[in-house]
Image: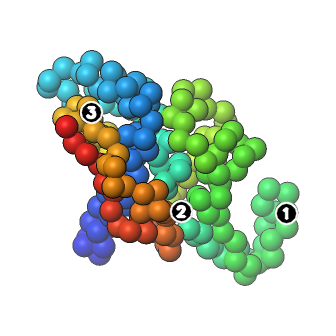
């Protein structure tokens, strides 16, 4: 079981990080703002320090919203005699599910839902908070994944502030293939470091 948790945790975090780096590198204003915040850090920063960075948190939340590592539906069986869910009666034994992919792209909740816009998380509505489902309700690794993302994003953009999308890159390379987990179609993200 431990091996399954390690693999599940590393694959999901790696995919999110890949899409996050791409999204940030594609938008110079986002990259400049993130880099400016990251370069305010002292050399001996800790994860506690990183948790205080508002824009870093917003960038990570937005990456998890658009590129949720496990965006597929998680089916559940309605117990017993049934229950009412959001005003709808569900009979016992019925299968119900929610999909992060759909919830995270609801235009009623997220304005311009396909656009990578970390600023939307600076003043999130209650509906945004409730619809945000980057991790399962009982995900054992969500805190570890968030820490890994904070540290990895910080290390990457402090080390490579001029990183940019490679000229050989094509958006089709990163088309999301979704089964239970999500991964890029061509399994590559071409970023030039300088």
Please give the name of the residue rendered at 44% of the width and 27% of the height, measured from the top-left corner. Answer: 29
Quadrant containing the C terminus in the rendered view: top left
CA gap between label 3 and label 2 equals 31 Å
Query: Is residue 61 visible in this depiction of the protein?
Result: yes
Q: What element carries label 1?
A: strand
Q: Which mark is residue 162?
A: 3
Instruction: Determine which quarter of the picture holds residue 130.
Output: top right
Mark 2 = which residue? 71
CA gap between label 1 and label 3 equals 51 Å
Q: In this view, does 91 lie above or below 16?
A: below
- Mark 2 is surrounded, within 10 Å at the Cα level, by few (under 14), some (14 to 19) or many (20 or more) other residues, namely many
Q: What element carries label 2?
A: loop
Residue furthest toward the bottom?
93
The image position of residue 38, as x and y in percent, is 29, 26
Relative horizontal placement of residue 14, taking residue 95 as reference (left or right): left
Q: Which mark is residue 180?
A: none
Please give the name of the residue rendered at 75% of the width and 44% of the height, measured from the top-left corner. Answer: 108
Closest to the observer, 8 or 117:
117
Query: Is residue 127 visible in this depiction of the protein?
Result: no
Please give the name of the residue rendered at 85% of the width and 57% of the height, measured from the top-left corner. Answer: 87
Q: Do the residues labelled 3 and 2 touch (CB within 8 Å)?
A: no
Please give the name of the residue rendered at 37% of the width and 26% of the height, measured from the top-left corner. Answer: 32
Q: Is residue 81 above or below residue 102?
A: below
Instruction: Determine which quarter of the picture holds residue 97.
Output: bottom right
């Amino acid at each position: 079981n431990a091996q399954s948790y390690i693999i599940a945790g590393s694959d999901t975090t790696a995919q999110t990080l890949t899409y996050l780096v791409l999204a940030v590198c594609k938008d110079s204003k986002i990259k400049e703002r993130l880099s400016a915040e990251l370069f305010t850090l002292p050399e001996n920063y800790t994860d506690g320090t990183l948790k205080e960075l508002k824009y870093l948190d917003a960038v990570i939340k937005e990456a998890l919203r658009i590129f949720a590592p496990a965006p597929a539906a998680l089916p559940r069986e309605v117990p017993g005699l049934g229950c009412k869910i959001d005003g709808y009666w569900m009979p016992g034994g019925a299968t119900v599910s929610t999909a992060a992919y759909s919830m995270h792209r609801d235009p009623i909740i997220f304005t311009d839902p396909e656009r990578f816009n970390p600023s939307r998380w600076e003043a999130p509505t209650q509906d945004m908070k409730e619809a945000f489902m980057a991790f399962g309700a009982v995900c054992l690794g969500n805190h570890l994944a968030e820490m890994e993302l904070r540290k990895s994003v910080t290390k990457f953009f402090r080390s490579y502030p001029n990183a940019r999308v490679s000229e050989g890159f094509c958006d089709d390379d990163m088309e999301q293939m979704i089964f239970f987990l999500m991964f890029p179609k061509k399994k590559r993200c071409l970023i030039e470091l300088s």
